[in-house]
């Protein structure tokens, strides 16, 4: 069986934790930050964790991470 290729987009956007969860950086922290609400920016500061419905698919895209 040939080796599976890692999905280039997924490896840039997601990382796996030691417990096997898929974490990602939340959106809305790149530009035009002066007009965004402080609460919105504070929530976006934290890492997000992919839900169980999407985590299995993301792990398939990154088999060697």
Image (cartoon, helix red, strand yellow):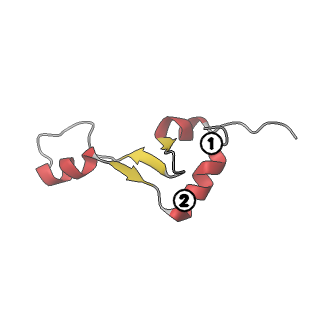
Horizontal side of residue 42 vs 16, given as left or right: left
From the top left corner, tell me how far across and down residue 39 is, in percent.
Answer: 15, 54
Most distant residue in the front direction = 18
Circle 2 — which element?
helix
From the top left corner, tell me how far across and down residue 49 is, in percent.
Answer: 42, 54
Picture disc at residue 54:
2
The quadrant of the rendering that contains the C terminus is top right
Mark 2 near mark 1, Cβ–Cβ under 8 Å?
no
Distance between mark 2 and mark 1 Cα atoms: 13 Å
Most distant residue in the bottom direction = 53
Give the residue displayed 51% in from the left and 45% down from the top: 18
The quadrant of the rendering that contains the N terminus is top right
Asked if residue 52 can be seen in this view, the reply is yes
Mark 1 surroundings: few (<14), some (14-19) or many (≥20) residues within 10 A:
some
Say which of 28 and 44 sits in front.
44
Give the residue displayed 17% in from the left and 40% down from the top: 33
From the top left corner, tell me how far across and down residue 31 is, in percent.
Answer: 23, 36
Horizontal side of residue 61 vs 44, given as left or right: right
Asked if residue 37 can be seen in this view, the reply is no
């Amino acid at each position: 069986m040939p080796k599976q290729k890692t999905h280039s987009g997924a490896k840039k956007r997601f990382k796996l934790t030691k417990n096997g969860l898929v974490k990602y950086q939340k959106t809305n922290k790149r530009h035009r930050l002066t007009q965004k609400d402080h609460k919105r920016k504070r929530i976006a500061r934290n890492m997000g964790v992919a839900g169980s419905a999407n985590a299995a698919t993301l792990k398939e895209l990154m088999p060697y991470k």
